[in-house]
């Protein structure tokens, strides 16, 4: 496609879809607040973003089990931390 | 002002639950119009732009742990808003309802009829969303390629490639309909 063709398509596009005017109907905070209220778990999420999942629990349980059965594995685990 | 803004960003990122929520509200009120305006440029629908503004701030709220106060809020929010708008364009029906009479620019070319404008708009909606968003921002809104690149998280060269591909696909689509731009 030549530059001339590109310019013609650009011009056609600009004629077809003019920039839209900004018409925000008002403050959107009440709607945002409603959404936050509908999902209270989101509000309770710690700011650090850390969340204990079942997988974390399973991994911790597995490591504790490993240590209980093979105490000699402790130095190896510490080395890999 | 600078110090206050820094405090708000810091509280939003790692404040206690209460201070973080208060900081979020402050950031929402400060930036809602800019985010809305940015999304409106992409989706070109006021009601949808409002919905996506809420969605954008919802995502911001959910991912505040990943926010880096040192890099500023505006750019981060714009990236999230762009992704929210892109997700919307991906799920949008290929040919949505178009207004009967598409508004023309004040300095409209009289040789371009309403039918040609309507078909062009339809062809534009058929473009892949990634190309459409790049063309919308770079060609219709005439934003600098650097600004478009930052919003899309790609290089300036990639923006140019996407715009070029969008224009070529558009030309081919219109040619198939017997319209020679």
Image (cartoon, rainbow, N blue to C red):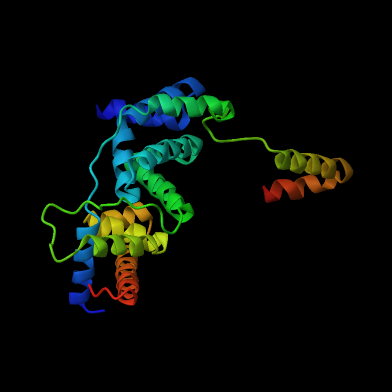
Instruction: Assign the C terminus of chain B to one quadrant of the image.
Output: bottom left
Name the quadrant containing residue B28.
Answer: top left
Q: Is residue B35 above or below residue B114?
A: above
**Could you tell me how many numbered marks the image carries?**
0
Question: x and y percent of residue B115 in the render?
Answer: 26, 63
Query: Do we see residue B134 in this rendering?
Result: yes
Front in this rendered view, residue B96 or A28: B96
- Identify which residue is drawn at 37% across, 39% down: B47
In the rendered structure, the answer to whether residue A77 lies left or right of residue B167 reads: right
Front in this rendered view, residue B177 or B45: B177
Query: Do we see residue A14 in this rendering?
Result: no
Question: x and y percent of residue B152 in the render?
Answer: 37, 55
Residue extending farthest to the left is: B107
Front in this rendered view, residue B6 or B103: B103
In the rendered structure, the answer to whether residue B56 lies left or right of residue B161 reads: right
Instruction: Assign the N terminus of chain B to one quadrant of the image.
Output: top left
Question: x and y percent of residue B43 in the render?
Answer: 35, 49
Residue extending farthest to the top is: B18
In the rendered structure, the answer to whether residue B43 lies left or right of residue A23 reads: right
Question: x and y percent of residue B103 in the render?
Answer: 22, 51
Name the quadrant containing residue A31.
Answer: top left
Q: Is residue A13 above or below residue B141?
A: below
Residue extending farthest to the right is: A69
- Identify which residue is drawn at 33% across, 40% down: B46
- Identify which residue is drawn at 59% across, 28% down: A41
- Identify which residue is drawn at 29% across, 52% down: B100
Name the quadrant containing residue B71.
Answer: top left
In the rendered structure, the answer to whether residue A23 lies left or right of residue B84 reads: left
């Amino acid at each position: 496609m030549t530059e001339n063709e590109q310019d013609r398509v650009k011009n056609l596009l600009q004629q077809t879809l003019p920039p839209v005017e900004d018409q925000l109907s008002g403050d959107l905070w009440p709607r945002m607040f409603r959404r936050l209220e509908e999902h209270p778990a989101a509000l309770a999420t710690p700011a650090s973003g850390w969340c204990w999942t079942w997988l974390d629990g399973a991994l911790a349980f597995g490591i504790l089990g490993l240590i209980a059965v093979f105490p000699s594995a402790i130095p190896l685990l510490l080395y890999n931390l | 002002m600078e110090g206050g803004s820094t405090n708000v960003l810091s509280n939003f990122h790692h404040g206690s639950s209460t201070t973080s929520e208060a900081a979020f509200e402050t950031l929402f009120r400060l930036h809602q119009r800019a985010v809305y305006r940015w999304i409106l440029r992409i989706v070109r629908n006021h009601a949808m732009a409002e919905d996506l503004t809420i969605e954008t701030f919802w995502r911001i709220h959910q991912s505040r742990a990943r926010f880096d106060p040192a890099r500023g809020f505006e750019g981060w929010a714009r990236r999230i808003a762009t992704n929210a708008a892109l997700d919307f364009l991906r799920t949008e029906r290929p040919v949505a309802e178009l207004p009967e009479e598409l508004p023309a620019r004040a300095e409209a070319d009289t040789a371009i009829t309403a039918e040609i404008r309507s078909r062009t708009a339809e062809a534009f909606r058929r473009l892949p969303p990634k190309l459409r968003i790049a063309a919308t921002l770079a060609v219709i809104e005439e934003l600098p390629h650097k600004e478009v690149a930052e919003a899309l998280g790609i290089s300036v060269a990639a923006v140019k490639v996407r715009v070029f591909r969008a224009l070529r696909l558009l030309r081919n689509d219109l040619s198939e309909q017997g319209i020679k731009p």
